[in-house]
Image: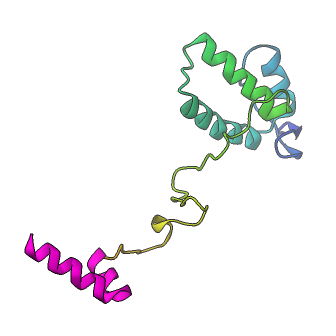
Amino acid sequence: MARTVRCVVLKKEAEGLDKPMHPGELGERIFENVSKDGWKQWLERLTTIINENGLSTADIEGIELIEKHMRGFFFGEGDYGHLPAGFRPPGAGARNRYGEPGATDIPNYVVPKPRIWLRSRCPALADNLCQISADA
């Protein structure tokens, strides 16, 4: 029968980990308080933390920082474990400076050619620009 834990990530009863996933006291704490689904969420966050901070898991300082993030993510200890301010996951689409969706958020969006767009907005200016480029 599967072991269940009160998962600190999911905030509900869920299937526990099969074995400690991290060494030491922190690993035991995680084993007792984190579910398999909670651990999967941590692995997603860990990927972001490693990439955003340029960490190496072969480096002692990198491992220490990862452990600080683990304590923050799982147990709310310290100022670590959160996504960086303004972080946007890949594929979330570009935003302009006002936080509005950019052209990449609109499916099948085609950027209009400047002269065509300008001609529809201000024909006189477009004609002048066309004349200037023809003279050049």
Q: Tell me which secondary structure the magenta stretch mostly adopts.
A: helix
Residue 84 image position (x, y, % from top left): 66, 39
Residue nearer the viewer, 119 or 6: 119
Q: Is residue 90 above or below residue 116?
A: above
Q: How many marks?
A: 0
In which quadrant will I find the N terminus? top right
Q: Place residue 39 in its image quadrant.
A: top right
Q: Nearer the viewer, residue 59 or 5?
A: 59
Is 134 magenta? The answer is: yes
Please name the residue shown 83% across and 15% down the image.
25
Relative to 73, is 122 above or below?
below
Q: Position of residue 78 (x, y in %)?
A: 83, 27
Q: Is residue 101 left or right of residue 72?
A: left
Quadrant of residue 99 within the rendered picture: bottom right
Which residue is more in the foreground, 39 or 135?
135
Please say which color scheme the image uses. rainbow
Residue 135: x and y in percent read 8, 74
Taking depth in this image into account, of 66 and 20 the one nearest to the observer is 66
Q: Please indicate, yes or no, whether residue 113 appears anywhere in the rendered image.
A: no
Residue occupying the far left of the picture? 135
Span highlighted in magenta in the image: 113-136
Viewer can see residue 43 = yes
